[in-house]
Amino acid sequence: MKILLVHNRYRSTAPSGENRVVDQELAALAAAGQDVELFERRSDEIEDWPAWKKATLPARVVWNPAAKRDLGETLQRFRPDVVHVHNTFPVLSPSVLYACRDAGVPVVISLHNYKLLCASGDFFRDGAVCHNCAGGNPLPGVRHRCYRGSTLATASTVLNTRSHRRSWRDLVSAFVFISESQRRLLAGLRFDPDRSFVRYNYVPYDGRVGRPGDGRKQRQVAYVGRLDAAKGAPLLMKGWDAYRAIAGDDALRLVIAGGGPMLDEVTAWAASRPSVELRGLLSKPEVFELLGESRGVVLPSEWEETFGLVVVEAMAVGVPPLASAHGSFPELVTDGVDGALFDPGRPDDLGKLLLDVDTDPDRYDVLGRNARATYEAKHDPGHAIGQLLDIYRFAIDQSATPLH
């Protein structure tokens, strides 16, 4: 099969699970013997644009003729059987759908966030979950300036999705949601259920799996990810302080790996807490090493995560995830079996959970073993790629008869 992946890469200054998914699936498809290429643009390139071109960005978000032209040329040269679109915002724009239509190539789209209904993409505003636009009316988002605190930027984002709403429905042969929770929250898109699939992200791991007594585990927990409010950085700090207030000095350590808009704030907070270590952005092998050293991995997300790669990465190395009980997390983690869930937005609840991790390490060793079993049963990499190829075949078969 000839497969073209299309992706607008996120900025390199903060970790991006979507970038990682695209890179990993590209490598896996190639390893499975498929003829696969990547057509991408990078958000980083905007910084190098001249001032006049930056001023055109709001219009390019809605329609980028250069992206359509360039993709059209790639389609003519490569002649793929199917195109798999991941992210089109902000540089590619929905114009890529029309390039595929003109070339007669079926499109599969993976929905990684809530962008088609929510300007900020996360159903999260002013430190809390917000579903004001979930029904399909984007005006609350514009009124609250939900994208970058800018009315213009939010309006262009909303125009991008609203003006092409019918095209997202009609020019796509298969829609891939990355959790059942995400599909429910995006019900306002009214996508054809017969062309909609739930497929968990591909999370490969063939490295070392921790075992009790192997000397690898440290008296620590880890946080890996972007440092911002939606991912729960404020809750992480408050929850850690609540835990230390109970536990005293003889307690767990917290190792934080990542970067993002709250890095300076987290750095200042950690500077006065010897129990906290910042390691910055780590390579994937370094992340897995950190996970394997830890008794648990904290996922304090305040937004309703569409998936959560770190949950499954923790399971892969045999470490229990400690996650907030909303979004996809209750779908991925069975509380008290292969991980632990705590009440979202409750630092005291997180503090109590961390105390339990420290005082009952044997129980969390058992949860870690069960987490590895869950990974093997539900997140087998070979099955994940086979499922993706089946979706591609479905899309190709769909394209034999026009959708409308």
Image (cartoon, rainbow, N blue to C red):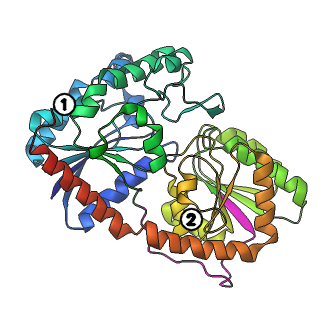
Amino acid type for the residue under numbered disc 2: Ala
Res 273 seen here: no
Q: Which residue has dot 1 on it?
A: 98
Q: Which residue has dot 2 on it?
A: 314
Asked which quadrant contains residue 50, the reply is: top left
Q: What crowding class fits label 2: few (fewer than 14 Cα within 10 Å), some (14-19), or many (20 or more)?
A: many
Residue visible at 88% across and 60% down in the picture: 247
Amino acid type for the residue under numbered disc 1: Tyr
> Is residue 208 found inside the magenta-colored segment of the image?
yes
Residue 131 picture location, percent across and down: 54, 30
Give the mark, 1 or 2, whose residue is nearer the N terminus.
1
Secondary structure state at the residue bearing disc 1: helix
Cα separation between marks 1 and 2:
39 Å
Residue 395 picture location, percent across and down: 19, 49
> Is residue 346 found inside the magenta-colored segment of the image?
no
Total number of numbered discs in the rendering: 2
Along the line of sight, the residue nearer the viewer: 7 or 126: 126
Residue visible at 30% across and 61% down in the picture: 387
Q: Residue 188 carries which label?
A: none
| Residue span colored magenta | 203-222
Pick the quarter of the image with the N terminus: bottom left
- Relative to 135, 253 lies left or right: right
- Relative to 336, 307 lies left or right: left
Secondary structure state at the residue bearing disc 2: helix
Asked which quadrant contains residue 235, the reply is: top right
Res 203 seen here: yes
Residue visible at 54% across and 46% down in the picture: 305
Residue 385 picture location, percent across and down: 31, 63
Magenta residues, dominant SS class? loop
Answer above or below: position of 392 versus 356: above
- Relative to 374, 85 lies left or right: left
